[in-house]
């Protein structure tokens, strides 16, 4: 059996077959053949109508669906399409009683794994083709899972599991489009740990990694489902706050983050206390692009560090004269060029 659970793992526990066939005698013969296979008998459940077949699929899992598409009350194409959708991830094999190349091609385009001419196939060949259909579907599922994992790794930070830069900027670009269209306010928060280098020096890089994971967990728990917390690398995190009433909401969140993220972290050698500095930039008052909001939030965060750390600062026009630590360039579709350091500016205090 091919069974996919919520974690997308695939388990093998036998072969359960749903046979949807409007001809009771043909269904009886085919069921007897499949259940009498010497290598590995199949367990066959029979349904005579499309509705009955869909009901069986809704009630339990099957590894394979066989269908004679000449069902009452529907068209062959509709029957195949409906069963393919309902059976997923199990494969669907169409049973045909006469050769028709064009019709067979349509069934395959609708998602059927194979089309078998039942009158011309020997029991051993039928058994082989059905098991090959199950094996092919299993391979497809494994490839899809591998692709999903690769896409997740490409879009998320390997250490913390938070979204990375590219995924953050894609979501921020989409949120900006919606905010601009509907007149909403949103904010970008730039979060940086104070004295992270000292933690690495005193406790080692393994402890530093544990600390970053702890910060990431608190960040993810501190934002709503509609928001995004991301890691930009090192000890830098960025938050997108969408659907705000105004800039004061963003500052309240920033103040709360300073308090929550500064509580002690339990590491292997004992509790460690760190503080954070947070910079805030809001749309539309502080900028209308992702790059501008990132730059201004970063500059505001740097101002918070210079003011004594363990605090937040919102972007203000008077900060415009402060040299930004880097220049942000966000290209189309959210792809981001690496940040370009502005001159030879010194690192932030305590980094």
Image (cartoon, rainbow, N blue to C red):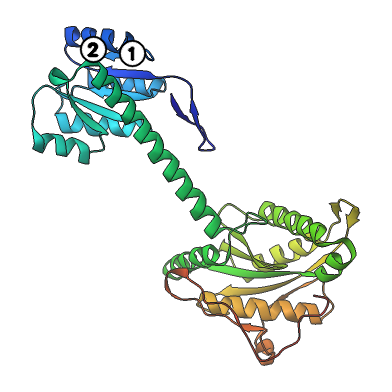
Rendered position, 76 above or below 301: above
> Total label count?
2
Q: Quadrant of the C terminus?
A: bottom right
**Left or right of 115, for residue 286:** right
Q: Which residue is mark 2?
A: 30
Q: Residue at point 84% right, 57% down?
A: 263
Q: Which residue is mark 1?
A: 44
The one nearer the camera, 185 or 170, is: 170
Rendered position, 178 above or below 125: below
Q: Quadrant of the N terminus?
A: top left
Rendered position, 203 above or below 39: below
**Left or right of 285, for residue 174:** left
Quadrant location of residue 86? top left
Residues at badges 1 and 2 in contact (C-beta under 8 Å)?
yes
Neighbours of disc 2 within 10 Å: few (<14), some (14-19), many (20+): some
**Left or right of 199, for residue 105:** left
Q: Determine whether the residue tagged by mark 1 lies in a helix, strand or loop.
A: strand
Q: Residue at point 42% right, 45% down?
A: 144
**Left or right of 130, for residue 189:** right
Residue 268: where, in percent of width, then height?
Answer: 87, 50
Q: Residue at point 42% right, 73% down?
A: 332
Q: CA distance from mark 1 to mark 2?
A: 9 Å
The one nearer the camera, 273 or 92, is: 92
Q: Residue at point 86% right, 69% down?
A: 198
Q: Please indicate, yes or no, whether residue 90 appears anywhere in the rendered image.
A: no
The image's mark for residue 298 is none
């Amino acid at each position: 059996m091919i069974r996919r659970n919520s974690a997308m793992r695939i388990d093998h526990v036998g072969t359960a077959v749903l046979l949807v066939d409007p001809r009771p005698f043909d269904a009886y013969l085919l069921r007897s053949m499949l259940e009498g296979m010497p290598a590995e008998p199949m367990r066959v459940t029979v349904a005579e109508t499309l509705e009955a077949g869909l009901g069986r699929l809704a009630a339990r899992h099957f590894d394979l669906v066989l269908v004679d598409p000449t069902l009452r009350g529907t068209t062959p194409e509709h029957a195949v399409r409906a069963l393919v959708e309902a059976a997923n991830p199990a494969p669907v094999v169409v049973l045909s009683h006469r050769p028709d190349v064009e019709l067979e091609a349509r069934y395959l385009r609708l998602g059927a794994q194979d089309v078998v001419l039942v009158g011309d196939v020997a029991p051993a060949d039928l058994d082989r083709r059905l098991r090959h259909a199950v094996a092919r579907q299993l391979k497809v599922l494994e490839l899809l899972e591998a692709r999903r994992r690769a896409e997740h790794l490409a879009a998320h930070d390997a250490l913390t599991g938070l979204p990375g830069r590219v995924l953050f900027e894609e979501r921020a670009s989409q949120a900006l489009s919606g905010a601009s269209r509907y007149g909403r306010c949103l904010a970008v928060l730039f979060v940086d740990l104070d004295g992270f280098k000292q933690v690495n020096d005193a406790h080692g890089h393994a402890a530093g990694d544990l600390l970053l994971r702890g910060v990431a967990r608190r960040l993810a728990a501190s934002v709503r489902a509609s928001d995004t917390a991301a890691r930009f690398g090192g000890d830098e995190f960025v938050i997108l706050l969408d659907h705000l009433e105004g800039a004061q909401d963003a500052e309240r969140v920033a103040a709360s983050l300073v308090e929550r993220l500064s509580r002690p972290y339990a590491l292997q050698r004992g509790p460690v206390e760190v503080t954070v500095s947070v910079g805030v930039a809001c749309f539309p008052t502080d900028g209308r692009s992702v790059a501008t909001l990132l730059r201004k939030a970063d500059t505001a965060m740097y101002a918070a560090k210079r003011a004594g750390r363990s605090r937040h600062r919102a972007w203000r026009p008077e900060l415009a004269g402060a040299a930004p630590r880097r220049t942000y360039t966000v290209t189309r579709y959210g792809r981001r060029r690496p940040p370009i350091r502005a001159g030879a500016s010194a690192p932030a205090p305590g980094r």
